[in-house]
Amino acid sequence: MRFLLPVISSLFELRRPPVRRVLLKQIYFTGNEAAWIMLLIGFALGGIVVSQLHDQYGQSREAAMRLLAALSFRELTPLMVGLVLIARSSSAVASELASMRVHGELRSLMRYGIDPVGYLVLPRVLGMTLAATLLGFLLALSAQLGGAFFVSGVDATYQLFQMDRIVTPAMVGICLGKSALFGFAASTLACVVGLRAKAYVTEIPKASSRAVVRGLVLVFLLDLIWAVMS
Amino acid sequence: MSDTSFTLALDPPLEVRLGEHYWLVEHDEIRRDNWLDTLARAALAIWPGHVASLDGTGGLVNNLRVWENLILPAWYHHAEPLPALEDSLLALFAEVGIEPDGAVGICQSLPSALGREYRQELALLRAALTRPFCLIIDGDWYTFLAYGRGLACRALFDRLAAQAVIFVVAAYPPPSTGFQRLEVVDASQLIVSGTHEATQG
């Protein structure tokens, strides 16, 4: 919490053009570059889930699609986004910040009066949170698409037109909320780990590894807490 | 030298005027860095956005292109339009004898691809873009002015130095006259105690 307060109060820093530039770069690297991966994962995930439900457990196509929507929007998608984000971006952010600390770049920025929380942490946390939210929605939609193709083949159009009956606003809300929470948690942790690295070169890979391992634990714990609370 | 005096919130408070130069000899590297941080913080409280730091290695951010590094402090604090910053930057490159074509090549590279001397030179350009009222200088950077590319930067440095308060923290005494001596007393207090004599040329 002691770390989060400066992040929240530094939202004012977004008035500065370089901070907005870092934010846009973070959204690009975390969101845009991962979009194709998410589409593929989502498509495969939808296919896997409905083939299990339809072929192994004998569910009808409609039931399989309904279960897929419930599973994917409420649970699988946010979790998958969290995992991909941690693998791709958390490790990169932690090693980048640790490297800046090791090479004295943070110190130099501070001597110029550039706030490291406002310039480095805020745009990364905000960028990863926004990107996670959008990727969550994209992944859930592509999972439905994959599921529809796997249960109906080329006649998937009918299944897709049924989506407005299967997917409720609450499901979408949960998907977006959870994805945002996991993105926020993973990015904040990555920044903390990176900035707390000791000033040795050997700390850079350690910071990267720590961000991944602790990020995984944190995301699963948050998911468990969400499941228990709801 | 300006008549207006400014008081830096140090312990005890330090009264300075633009154009004055101070030199602190500190042999321990960690304490040297800490003093540079302390002086920068105190100066930033008086001249926010107009304090520049010249670090021994240049202090550029390795994952930003050189052009982004150079404009960062000025862009961050003053939000100047990018075309205006670009013009100022090209003028500064010309001042240190680098043609526009060469400047474009340097600006597009990453700092890690450049030698130490180039990085130190670029640190001076970055400082100049902020139109500094105070320069916080690491002794490792100051030696750069005595050789190689540093000689071409001397005129620019002198121009900046004439309008700014300069603090140098080094492991050695100043090589030229004109610096007031800073001294650490009781481990944490900084006082002015006369002037330094030149140790060489």
Image (cartoon, coloured by chain):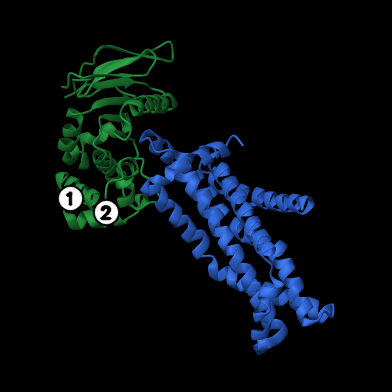
| Residue sitting nearer the eye, A213 or A67 | A67
Q: Quadrant of the C terminus of chain B?
A: top left
The kind of residue tagged 1 is Ile
Q: Position of residue B190 (x, y in %)?
A: 36, 15
Q: Residues within 10 Å of mark 1 (few under 14, many from 20)?
A: some
- Distance in Å between CA atoms under marks 1 and 2: 10 Å
Residue, disc 2? B106
Q: Is residue B186 left or right of residue B192?
A: right
Which mark sits nearer the N-terminus, 1 or 2? 1
Relative to B180, say whether A69 is above or below: below
In the image, what residue occupies the spot 73% across and 76% down? Answer: A65
Tell me which chain the residue with mark 1 is part of.
Answer: B
Position of residue A161 relative to residue B139, above or below, is: below
Quadrant of the image occupied by residue A77: bottom right
Mark 2 residue element:
helix
Out of A170 and B130, give the one closest to the viewer. Answer: A170
Q: Position of residue A90 (x, y in %)?
A: 57, 53
Residue behind mark 1: B98
Asked if marks 1 and 2 touch (Cβ < 8 Å), the reply is yes
Coordinates of residue A127 in the picture (x, y in percent):
50, 54
Q: The disc labelled 2 sits on which kind of residue?
A: Ile
Horizontally, residue A146 falls left or right of residue B66, namely right
Q: Please give the chain letter of the residue carrying mark 2.
A: B
- Vertical placement of residue A88 versus B44, above or below: below
Chain identifier of the blue chain: A
Residue B25 in view in this figure:
yes
